[in-house]
Amino acid sequence: MKILITGGAGYIGSHVVKALGKLGHDLVIYDNLSTGHRQAVTYGELVVGDLAEKSKLEALFEAKKFEAVLHFAGSIVVPESVAHPLKYYQNNTLNSHFLLSLCEKYKVKKFIFSSTAAVYGMPEDGLCTENSPLSPINPYGHSKLMTEQMLKDLAASSEFRFVALRYFNVSGADPEGQLGQSFPEATHLIKVACEAACAKRDHLKIYGTDYPTSDGSCVRDYIHVSDLAEAHVRALEYLERGGKSDILNCGYGHGFSVKEVVKLIKEVTGVDFKVIETDRRAGDPASLTAKVDRIHGILQWKPQFDDLKVIIRSAYEWEKKKPY
């Protein structure tokens, strides 16, 4: 297929580009390189541009005649969204609106959307099904939920079909060592801890130790980025077979506390880096884990890296040699 991938030079997008490229798809990667990297684009044609550059993006649609769009581009840092909400509504919601308008105009009927577990807010028991109440507690989650609603409404009014994948905590790196997380000033726990283990930071902070969890630190469902990439491939194949629009959780269905993860990172790396316990971070729920029955059943998705030690080891090996 001829596929447009927005944000394909970023962490998750680049892993999906590699997975789709290996299958022989004709890829165009559209990325402003604000957080992505040229070196991360291993297949296809890279076009440097911003989704807000409307004439440039429309010219691409007109020239390339895309059959599908995978949409990763956007802002993703929860505390930043609390401090600068309008940036998130611009980058994540308004830019998505324009992208969808081009899909409608140029009759692109297959769309995969990079959504988030942040749409659930603070679920009572910490376990999220796709039918759990949607009540984001930060602008990041709200901005993604608004795009989900646009997708639903467009699909209800036309032949357009989509799969929105609600990511839980994406971690790890390409097992072949070619790709990894190089987000500037990263905030994701495993990435930051691996930087501390490599002496790129002098300490790691644990934000909040008074949550209603087993040890007081936040609990999250960690998923290996390569398994997530495979979920996108399966979602695209599902739409190509005529599958109906759907929204699916992407996680492993079990969680680990921040303290548990930090302990395991020290064990895997053999480095006893400094840890500082501090106040809660704005916009963080106590616990988020995924119910994943539907993605297994609908997409026939079978994770290959559901082992926290494997995730950590891949992230650490990437961090030690990170070329970009």
Image: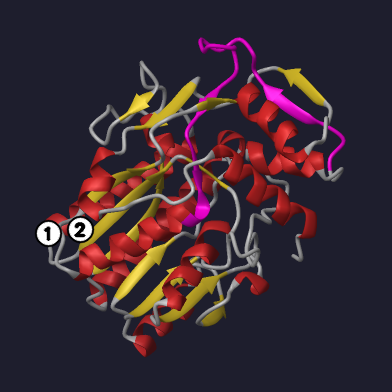
> Pointers 1 and 2 in contact (CB under 8 A)?
yes
In the picture provided, is 21 more to the left or to the right than 246?
right
Q: Could you tell me the amino acid type at mark 1?
A: Ser
Q: Nearer the viewer, residue 50 or 324?
A: 324
Picture coordinates of residue 135, whole percent (x, y): 35, 28
Residue at 19%, 55% (x, y): give it. Answer: 245
For residue 20: magenta? no
Residue that numbered label 1 is attached to? 157
Quarter of the rendering occupied by the C terminus = bottom right
Residue that numbered label 2 is attached to? 154
Element at badge 1? loop
- Taking 64 as reference, is 89 above or below it? above
Quarter of the rendering occupied by the N terminus = bottom left
Q: Which residues are magenta?
A: 201-226
Element at badge 2? helix
Q: Could you tell me the amino acid type at mark 2?
A: Leu
Residue at 47%, 28% (x, y): give it. Answer: 255
In the picture provided, is 146 more to the left or to the right than 176?
left
Picture coordinates of residue 151, whole percent (x, y): 26, 54
- Taking 54 as reference, is 202 above or below it? above
Picture quarter containing residue 207? Answer: top right
Q: CA distance from mark 1 to mark 2?
A: 5 Å
Picture coordinates of residue 2, whole percent (x, y): 35, 82
Residue at 43%, 35% (x, y): give it. Answer: 118
In the picture provided, is 38 more to the left or to the right than 50?
right
